[in-house]
Amino acid sequence: MHVAQLHYDSSHGRGRGGWVLALALSLAVCWQDATIGSELPDVSSKVLQAQQDRMRVMRQAAEATISIFGLDGGGGGSGVIITPDGYALTNYHVSSACGDHMRCGLSDGSMVDAVIVGIDATGDVSLIQLLGRDDFPTAPLADSASVQVGQWCFAAGNPFMLASNRQPSISLGIVSGTNRYQYPDGTLLEYADCIQTDAAINPGNSGGPLFNLAGEVIGINGRCSFEKRGRVNVGVGYAISANQIKYFLGVLRSGRLVDHATLGATVSTDSAGKIVVSNILSSSDAFRRGLRYGDEVLSLADREVSSTNMFKNILGTLPKNWRVPMTVRRDGETRTMLVRLTGVHTEKQLIELVSPERSTPPGPRRSDDPTETEKGPQPQQELSERLRGEPDLMRLVPDKQLVQSRLERRPGFANYYYNQMNQQRLWQSLQGQGDFATTAENWEFQGNLAGEKTPFLLRLDDRSGILRIGSRELSVDFQESVSDVVAARDQRGLLVALRAAQQLLKTGPFQIGDSVYLGTAPVYMGNSQILAEQPLMDVLQSLWYDATVRFSFDASGRIALVEVFGDPENDPIELYMNDYQAVEYGEEKFYVPTRLRLQYGTQTTLLLERQSAVLKPSANAASSSVSEEKADS
């Protein structure tokens, strides 16, 4: 009997008898084929090897996948470890149900304590840290921009909390779509530029990883679609892209409640199909950089803007405070500008949105299809009942002393402990540049304007600063309004910014003013305006006089950029400092920049090349002066 006929008979059989007959006939055909002629050919060795490779990758991926449990059995989900010292990613809607202390199960059956580190409530991502080890198995983050529709992928996690042995379940599928935008639709969560997959994602999978076949994390599983009755997965799941997570990872490590970016402008599609600026705030940085109503938007943050949806996708993956390139066309001319992004929420709004007292938790939201509901797969009642039915899972003995040493609650922070830890790390790096506390407030730099022979003399003390360029002299009294100097946009800004750097070097972040570690952000040190080419630097923010100062640190722990903010509608002072060289005092060395570039917006106002430096000793130091040693940094 031919296969086509067999298919016809089985599909047209009446009742159970038709299917039984079809099964019998198919077995007969298989037996006949196996007994007539030569033996069936062996399965290709390449197929078997591919299967072994896939199994190996999945075993390794499972080792880095964790099950997350709330201490009271009221929440749970999945996650993935990304560093050997235990930093792991999960969903915000998972961590918010568990609180700031949770327990995590590893594939080897062990359970460890974990604490919250940072929260991105809008993007539905949280960073936690597993405690007690520094050799956890990890999974690398992929370049999710290379993900393509149709490629194989697999999800790992703990659906329905079935993995009582902590070994995660694996579901194989394909990438069904990329660059998907999921509207908040009345909820806090906004899924921008996410990856769609048909790999089975069910309640309990939330926060778990979506892998490519190389075992790299291409996304963190979040929303998915279910049938209304029975909560059955229908093969439509969404994962937050790995590249978005890479952008936010630095700010999540700050221990803060982090925010997503807004441009201060909106776009729409005109009658010719172009993406144009439809509205813009005159107070926005984009307006100050020259963006205007009607400009055609070509790209944002190095990515092509082909639709209003894509514009929202790109913007939704960027953190607050970042500067990114934006290319527009006006009257046939194309120009690229660096725009500083602001936040979607105020700090007060963020605190209210993530407060445990909120009456309405994030999700679910209705989709356009009335037969399904899309939400983060975290049905709390269902999971709670499952956990209560498995008492072994909740047989927890938390290390309270270890946990409490890593937790510090403070408004505006997910965990202030990690902010202090990073401030201390930056302070130790600064101290490695020299013990500036042994120097007095009196500093003196001399040199020339860059590329010229015009000399300059710069002097700082604890009250004022003087800058002489040729026969011209500028001065600043630091006891007066610093914000007025910011608004003036003149060369005195160099004195103000340098004074801020001096005080940080001498006193550290805990004494200069109320300081906060903001995380990482791109810094444009050279001429390139390509975001991908910029280093992500640590950023420390301090309240200073009547201004706000942000210090950016290079990979060596040196101050690369000082930004002094006054009125929000004015460009800040920007002082770029590089080409550090050693200045010697006795047996001590102090590293001081040789190039100082003052900038407002994107225009350079002053560029100095320092040739000598005198850092006078403090009253309790030795009486000899500090002079420059010609040495490499």
Image: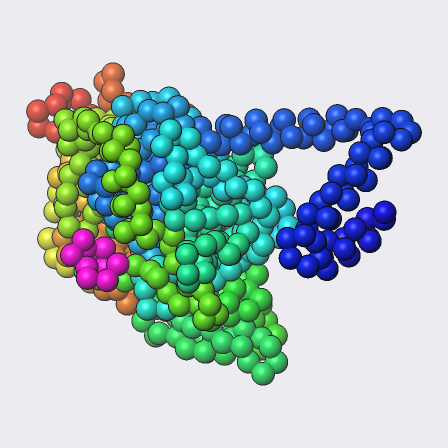
Q: How many marks?
A: 0
Compare residues 170 and 603 and report the one nearer the observer: 170
- Direction front: furthest residue: 17
Q: Which residue lies furthest to the top in this view?
A: 587
User: Relative to residue 451, is residue 131 drawn left or right?
Assistant: left
How has the structure been colored for display? Answer: rainbow
In the image, residue 113 lies at what x, y percent?
Answer: 25, 30
- Which residue is painted at 18% across and 36% down in the image? 407
> Is residue 544 found left or right of 193 in the rendered image?
left
Q: Judge whether residue 355 is colored magenta.
A: yes
256 or 449, which is in the foreground?
256
The x and y percentages for residue 525 are 43, 46
- Residues in magenta? 350-361
Question: Is residue 175 shown to the viewer in this render?
Answer: yes
Q: Residue furthest right?
A: 37
Against 332, residue 29 (above or below) is above
Q: Which residue is drawn at 81% across and 48% down?
A: 3
Q: Relative to 307, is 37 above or below?
A: above
Q: Residue furthest left?
A: 620
Query: Residue 512: x and y, percent?
Result: 15, 42
| Residue 521 visible, this angle | no
State which quarter of the image contains the C terminus: top left
Q: Residue at x 80, y 34 (%)?
A: 31
Q: Does residue 477 belong to the magenta stretch? A: no
Q: Between 419 and 257, which is closer to the camera in this rendering? A: 257
Nearest the viewer among 16 and 421 is: 16
Residue visible at 82% across and 53% down?
Answer: 5
